[in-house]
Amino acid sequence: VQLQASGGGLVQAGGSLRLSCVVSGSFHSISDLGWYRQTPGKQREMVARMDSEGNDNYAATVMDRFTITRDSAKKTVDLHMNSLKPEDTGVYYCHGAAFLAGKGWSPGRKVDSWGQGTLVTVSS
């Protein structure tokens, strides 16, 4: 399972960016898709994620500013970021949990995969 993220860049505070991630490879189905970010000296933290039924949850720091969307047919997950703040600066990673092919039509074991990370810089 491979994830390819894109869309990072430099933006002024108050601006918007959209991150996109496409999932490829061989697997039975995709479970959760989400976005995490990491800043220097801090652990990677969950920003937003969505399960296969469309249920989403967000970090408190981005609630009402960020929106995660998912297209199951295209196997993509986007993060729409509005009202960006300098503290949103970081490397954003796309994450996906997928079930590999199992016996017959059944799902096999679940694996976690990460994209390569895309840098978001918000200037004040």
Image: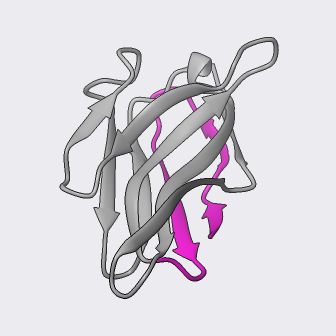
- Looking at the picture, does residue 123 appear above or below residue 69? above
Residue 7 in the magenta stretch? The answer is: yes
Q: Which residues are magenta?
A: 1-27
Question: Residue 94, percent across and down?
Answer: 58, 51
In the image, residue 65 above or below residue 60: below
* Residue 4 picture location, percent across and down: 65, 67
Q: Quadrant of residue 104?
A: bottom left
26 w.r.t. 40: above or below: below
Tell whether position 25 is magenta.
yes
**Which residue is outermost to the bottom?**
104
Residue 3 occupies which quadrant of the picture?
bottom right
Left or right side of 64 for 1? right
Q: Which is nearer the eye, 124 or 82? A: 82
Instruction: Describe the colour scheme in one phrase.
Output: one colour
**Residue at the extreme front of the image, as rendered:** 103
Residue at position x 50%, y 29% in the image:
46
